[in-house]
Amino acid sequence: MASGKGLLETIGEHVQEHRSGMVVDFVFALTWVTVVTVVFDVLLGAPQWVYYLALAGGVVAYYGFFWSLEIVQGDES
């Protein structure tokens, strides 16, 4: 903020610059949480810690999915 910009202006510029990536991240997270919640609602009797572990597995799934996607796109060019 040394350039004299306000915090809201800086945040607004950041959001404009990364809008599409933020939307993709949000959709992935929303889908992952929905799928895990539906699976654990159907599989009654699973301990709560397993549910939380599956939710945390979304971080690994996110990076694994987009890392492999970058590799595939790199092979095509």
Image: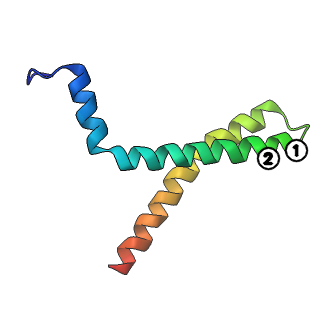
Give the position of the C terminus as an image quadrant.
bottom left
Color style of the picture: rainbow
| Residue 48, horizontal then vertical, whole percent | 79, 31
Q: Does the CB distance between marks 1 and 2 fall below 8 Å? A: yes
Q: Residue furthest left?
A: 3
Residue at (47% x, 46% y) in the render: 25
Amino acid on which disc 1 is placed = Leu
Q: Dot 1 lies on which element?
A: loop
Residue at (23% x, 35% y) in the render: 13
Q: Is residue 51 left or right of residue 62?
A: right
| Closer to the camera in the image, 66 or 34 | 34
Disc sitting over residue 77 in the figure: none
Q: Is residue 17 left or right of residue 26?
A: left
Which image quarter: residue 72?
bottom left
Q: Is residue 31 visible?
A: yes
Q: Dot 2 lies on which element?
A: helix
Q: Is residue 59 visible?
A: no
Q: Is residue 39 left or right of residue 9?
A: right
| Residue 22, horizontal then vertical, whole percent | 41, 43
Neighbourhood count class around disc 1 (C-alpha, 10 Å): few under 14, some 14–19, many 20 upward: few
Give the position of the N terminus as an image quadrant.
top left
Compared to 35, does 77 lie above or below? below
Q: Residue furthest right?
A: 45
Q: Is residue 46 left or right of residue 67?
A: right
Which image quarter: residue 75?
bottom left
| Residue 70, horizontal then vertical, whole percent | 41, 65
Disc sitting over residue 43 in the figure: 1
The residue indicated by pointer 2 is: 39
Amino acid on which disc 2 is placed = Val
Q: Residue furthest bottom?
A: 76
